[in-house]
Amino acid sequence: MKNIAIVIPTFNELENIEKLIHEIKIKLPEAKIFIIDDSKTKEIGELIKNKNLKVNYFHRSDASGRGSAVIYGFNKAIRDENKYEIFIEMDADFSHDPNELLRNIDFFEKKKLDLLIASRYLTGSQIINWSLSRRILSKLSNFLARNLLNIPLKDFTNGFRIYSPGAINSIILSCGNIGDGFILLSEIIVVIKNNFMKIGEINTKFVNRERGVSSVNLKLVLASLYGLIKLAIIKKRLK
């Protein structure tokens, strides 16, 4: 198995993080996990230390949102002494199933991709426990992204992804200037596409959180929609 770095942004995920780490280590025991914690307290860090969970933990007191946390994690991983050949991004709330990791990595390598998106809108995918309003909002966001950006993908806003080192370098160099939250996920797609790298999608089972509280709110959604329009205007300049 190649050297793998897994970046997990967290915000008030104390109820989930230990179980998630254990499940990832069962599937990928040699992978290095980078926890980027934007919680107000360091309870997650204390848990990791007390349980000796052996992950790389970073607490940011000036939390700037999921997108910047992911880029922060990529920066830490790319500068690590290990030379990672695969970078994975996933959420801490079990909406992204650790049981899909090995299958996704195999698909990523066989297709020689630079970005693999676990797409909720492919044949064979499932979305569980989402309200009708969240389904409509997600469908609308992806419809707008697909048409405004003119990129034929099904899912622009799921943060369960695998990246090549080349993709990570482009992300660190170019992404994060338009906005945070879900808009960064679309910005990453544009940058990778503009650099003529290969993007693929794979079906997934997305389960809305069973524990904890979602950080998604109307303000974040509106900011992401505004950012999408801005991204569509400047997309050709992103490299």
Image: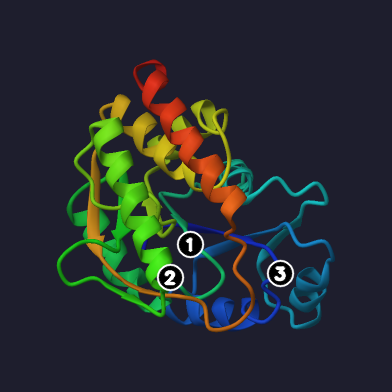
Q: Is mark 3 on a helix, strand or loop?
A: loop
Question: Which three-letter amino acid code belongs to the residue tagged 2?
Answer: His
Determine whether 121 is above or below 176 in the image: below
Using the numbered discs, state the Cα–Cα distance from disc 3 to disc 2 in whole angstroms.
Answer: 17 Å
State whether residue 239 appears in this view: no
Residue 147 lies, in percent from the top left, at 24, 36
Q: Which of marks 1 and 3 is nearer the N terminus?
A: 3
Using the numbered discs, state the Cα–Cα distance from disc 1 to disc 3 in whole angstroms.
Answer: 15 Å
Q: Nearer the viewer, residue 196 or 177?
A: 177
Residue denoted by label 2: 96
Question: Which three-letter amino acid code belongs to the residue tagged 1?
Answer: Met
Residue 99 lies, in percent from the top left, at 37, 79
Residue denoted by label 1: 90
Position of residue 13 in the picture relative to residue 189 (left or right): right
Q: Nearer the viewer, residue 81 or 182?
A: 182
Residue 142 lies, in percent from the top left, at 32, 48
Residue denoted by label 3: 12
- Residue occupying image coordinates x 74% and y 75%: 48
Position of residue 173 in the picture relative to residue 2 (left or right): right
